[in-house]
Structures are given as C-alpha cells and as structure tokens.
Image (cartoon, helix red, strand yellow):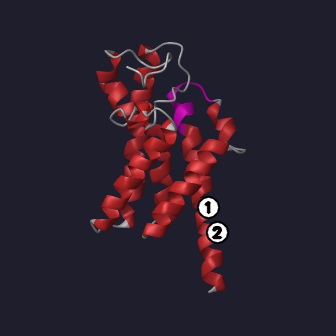
Amino acid sequence: MAFLRATDPTPRQLLSAPVLVGSLGLVGFAPKARGTAGTLLCALMALGLYLGDVHAEVWLPLAGAAALLSWLSGELVLRKLEGLKDPSWFVMDEAAGYFFTLGLMKADSLLAILAGFLTFRFYDIAKPWPVRSFERIPGSVGILADDLVAGILAAWTCYAVFAVSAALT
C-alpha cells in the first residue's frame, strides 16, 4: 500500500478498532498533511451540523467525546504498536482540539467555523509555547494535551479578533 509509511501499522492492523478510531476512519493515513486532513474532516462535520441547524452548544460535548476516544484509543495504539510516541496518522486528538476551539468560541457562524479551523491548525503546526511543552507528557495524555492547549490559544485568538472587529464597526 503506497500511502503507508514505514512507521504506520501493517495493513492487517489498519482494521483494528483503535487504529480506525484514532485515524478517524483512516483519514489520518492521507499521503500528506495528515493532521490537517483529520481537522478538515471535522470542519466538514461542523459545517454539516451548522447547516443542519445544530447550535453551538454541541461543540464542547463533541470535544469531550473526541478527547475520551483519543485517550482510550491512544492508550490501546501505544500498547499494541510499541515504539510509537505520537503517530502522525493518529488524528483523533486533532478532532478533540478543533471541537474544543469551536466550543470555547461558541462558534455559531460559517466564519467562526473557518476561523477556528485556520487558527487551530496554525497553533497545532507551529506549536508555540505552551503548546510544545504539553507534547512532552508521556502516553496518550501527551498526544491529546498539546491539541487541547492549541485549541485554547486558537479560541482566544479568534475571540480577540472578532471582538476587535466588532468594536471597529
């Protein structure tokens, strides 16, 4: 399978529940920008929920569910596939971080969903302080923690930009 990297699970392991959950249904195995692919899937889900008239109160429960799934599947993945610290294909943590961003923002518009996506990806990729320091936590908690902190910074950034924009108009 050409899209698999040397550190990825074997084709047989791909169909195990922890790998399917952790990779968001194999989206995490995109050939490039795996974290962005996982977050984009979540942004499309957010868009669908928004267009389906689901209100902003859904984001934090979604973030909580994604965080729990990230932690549980992460523990199973790290036990089964020894030697991995934070596999690039494991993108359930991005789902938790992105939905956390939307929840903290109380995202209730297409602009907020897009701004949350862009700022979350910025903080998750750039990993400024304190995001990078949370990566050092061992196990699946560390895999998840940096994304939640990136989500906090992204939400604060969006909130500040939207507040300044509203004040200037």
| Element type where label 2 sits in the image | helix
Q: Position of residue 52 (x, y in %)?
A: 27, 65
Magenta span has 22? no
> Is residue 104 depicted above or below 10 in this figure?
below
Kindly report the secondary structure that dominates the magenta region of the rendered protein.
Answer: helix
Relative horizontal placement of residue 145, taking residue 22 as reference (left or right)? right
Residue 47, x across and y down, in percent: 36, 60
Residue 31 in the image: above or below residue 78? below
Q: Which residue is mark 1?
A: 156
**Quadrant of the image containing the N terminus:** top left
Q: Which residue is mark 2?
A: 160
Q: Give the residue at x 54% y 27%.
A: 86
Query: What type is the residue that disc 1 sits on?
Result: Trp
Query: Is residue 142 rendered magenta in the image?
Result: yes
Q: Position of residue 82 (x, y in %)?
A: 49, 12
Q: Is 75 above or below relative to 105?
A: above
Left or right side of 12 for 71: right
Q: Which image quarter: residue 159?
A: bottom right
Which residue appears farthest toward the front when viewing the image? 2
Check contact, mark 1 vs mark 2: CB within 8 A: yes
- Residue at x 62% of width, y 78% of height: 165
Q: Residue at x 57, y 32 (%)?
A: 142
Which residue is at the front of the view, 107 or 137?
107
Can you see residue 42?
Answer: yes
Q: How many marks?
A: 2
Tell me which segment is drawn in magenta: 137-144
Seen from this angle, which residue lies furthest right? 129
- The residue at the point 34 percent across, 53 percent down is 45
